[in-house]
Amino acid sequence: MDRISILCIYLDKCSTFADVACDHGYCAQYMLENNMCESAVISDISDKCLKKAETLLSEYIKKGVCRAVCCDGLEGVDGQTEQILIAGIGGEEIVKILKNAFIPKAFVFQPMKNAEVVREYLIENGCALTVDGIFTDGKNYYFIIKGKNCGGEQTYTKAELLYGRDSLKSPVFKNYLKEQIEKKRAYLMRDMTDEHRKRLEADVSFMQGVLNGEID
């Protein structure tokens, strides 16, 4: 399965749905075609990308059950939207979007990098993370963060914050971590400053400890 198909598995049935940074709009298409939502908003900062999604979802737009908004982040999205998806962009960008607007009532985030930044921000702001794991499309690995803005309180260890609480129990994560360790060890063969080498060696030691179950 491809990334988008797997991502859709994590979406819940809801009344209102928003696909932010929607690109082609495939996730909104999935929600509407499968009667997973009554109405949807597709938004993207890129007018070019949004036009592709508008073309894909033109019939739903004509019916009045889908609305397209060219905007930065959540600017054009109602804060009462029941479920919001933000996928395919960096973790720091996701946090910037949330800080500039609001944390959704229910959310699914799939950061392409820096997932730990998203976890930390959500936990600090009282969100309950119900799914915090990893998946692969057979070529690449992706972290998935799903939860609710419900005033919850969770305590995460360093490893859980870096990789996701559910990831640590996943065979997919073990394969991911092995690959990351191999990459860092290969990089250690290069010339670098002593300070840089010490940081890399510390990273490898920590990752190996997580992989061996010695650090949780």
Image: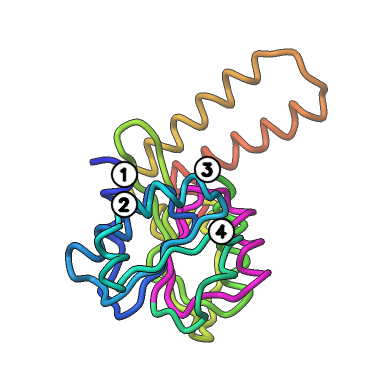
Is disc 2 surrounded by few (<14), some (14 to 19) or many (20+) residues within 10 Å? some
Circle 3 sits in a helix, a strand or a loop, which is it? Answer: helix
Label 2 vs label 4, nearer the camera = 2
Question: Which residue was labeled with disc 1?
Answer: 171
| Cβ–Cβ under 8 Å for marks 1 and 2 | no
Q: Which residues are magenta?
A: 83-112
x then y, percent, for residue 98:
61, 68
Question: Which residue was labeled with disc 4?
Answer: 161
Is disc 4 surrounded by few (<14), some (14 to 19) or many (20+) residues within 10 Å? some
Circle 4 sits in a helix, a strand or a loop, which is it? Answer: helix
Q: Does the stretch in magenta take in 10?
A: no
The label on residue 209 is 3
Give the CA separation, mark 4 to mark 3. Answer: 15 Å
Residue kind at label 1, given as amino acid type: Pro
The label on residue 26 is 2
Earlier-in-chain disc, 3 versus 2? 2
Give the CA separation, mark 1 to mark 4. Answer: 18 Å
x then y, percent, for residue 69:
49, 64
Which of the pair 96/61 is nearer the observer?
Answer: 61
Residue kind at label 2, given as amino acid type: Tyr
Measured along the vertical axis of the image, is residue 27 above or below residue 64? Answer: above
The label on residue 151 is none
- Residue beneath the point at 24% across and 58% down: 30
Q: Does the stretch in magenta take in 91?
A: yes
Which of the pair 49/151 is nearer the observer?
Answer: 49
- Residue beneath the point at 51% across and 55% down: 44
Residue kind at label 3, given as amino acid type: Gly
